[in-house]
Image (cartoon, helix red, strand yellow):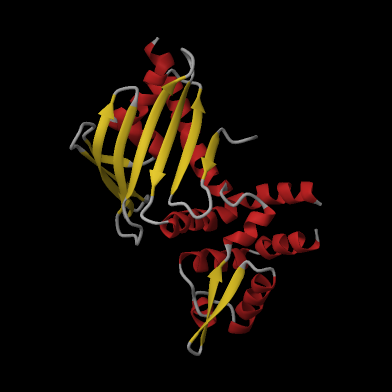
Amino acid sequence: MPLKTHINAEDGRQDMRITRDFDLPVELLFRAYAEPDLVAQWMGTNVLKLENKQHGGYQFETSDPQGNVVFRAHGVVHEFRTNEKIIRTFEMENTPFPAQLEFLEFEKRTDDTSRLTMHVIYRSPEDRDQILKLTFAQGINMAHNRLQDTLGKLK
Amino acid sequence: MKIRRDIFQAIADPTRRAILTLVATHAMTPGAIADSFDSSRQTISKHIQILTECQLLTQELSGREIYYHFNPNKMKEVAEWLMPFAKMWDVRFNKLESIMKNHQSNKK
């Protein structure tokens, strides 16, 4: 099944765009970012803080079944316009990755469909590629079967 | 397609995938890689050799030590290397979509 999420990351640049079309009215899509209990559900993380307003901040924390914290991230909110856009920073704690800047734009397509565009700016092209490399390595295992399919077609 | 099949064989092995995962975070010496596994140095060395031959790992000489780097460029030739990143977001967004659809129908 083709992915509904499109990544545009050009070589040598320090930004990327993540675009996704949803079968959801834009109001519902936006609520998934605005309400802490909904964010927690789809992100699969605990939402310790979510102040969706200018000068606000947020904090996420994920624990494994034994209760050890395996992921912590936080950021500040620069702009929050309902059903339109969120501008915020994002930083993973206890990792060498520097903070990144995120521009999230919510667009109505039809009454029942919407589009989210995330424009993410990293500190350097190397920092961006480092994130991609890490995900790539983690993804090797799960991407393995799909690679097999792809390669099967190339033969 | 000979080379591509070699890359596929290289990543088909779980130990070699584990080596790639390790080295992707930072460049490592063969000794440091071997120390992360229970297998013998000789076995790990053979795996590193295979990964290097198909250019998934590249070597860099620093002083008297050889460091191995992960080379994602090579993977681009085989399949879209952004795929896992896109997949990660796609899974997340699918979840968002289904949660919000339920949310919507519960409200009706």
Residue most extreme to the top: B108
Horizontal side of B20 relative to A89 (left or right) equals right
| Residue at (39, 40) in percent of width and height | A44
Horizontal side of A2 relative to A16 (left or right) equals right
Residue A153 location, x and y as percent? 78, 46
Residue most extreme to the front: A12
Residue B6 location, x and y as percent? 74, 64
| Residue at (52, 41) in percent of width and height | A7
Residue A18 to residue B71: above or below:
above
Nearest the viewer among A11 and A127 is A11
| Residue at (20, 33) in percent of width and height | A54
Nearest the viewer among B64 and B92 is B64
Residue B74 location, x and y as percent? 64, 61
Q: Quadrant of residue A116?
A: top left
Horizontal side of A22 relative to A120 (left or right) equals right
Q: Quadrant of residue A94?
A: bottom left
Q: Quadrant of the N terminus of chain A?
A: top right
Horizontal side of A61 relative to B83 (left or right) equals left
Number of numbered discs on residues = 0
| Residue at (56, 49) in percent of width and height | B82
Residue B95 to residue B21: above or below:
above
Residue most extreme to the bottom: B64
Residue A108 location, x and y as percent? 43, 19
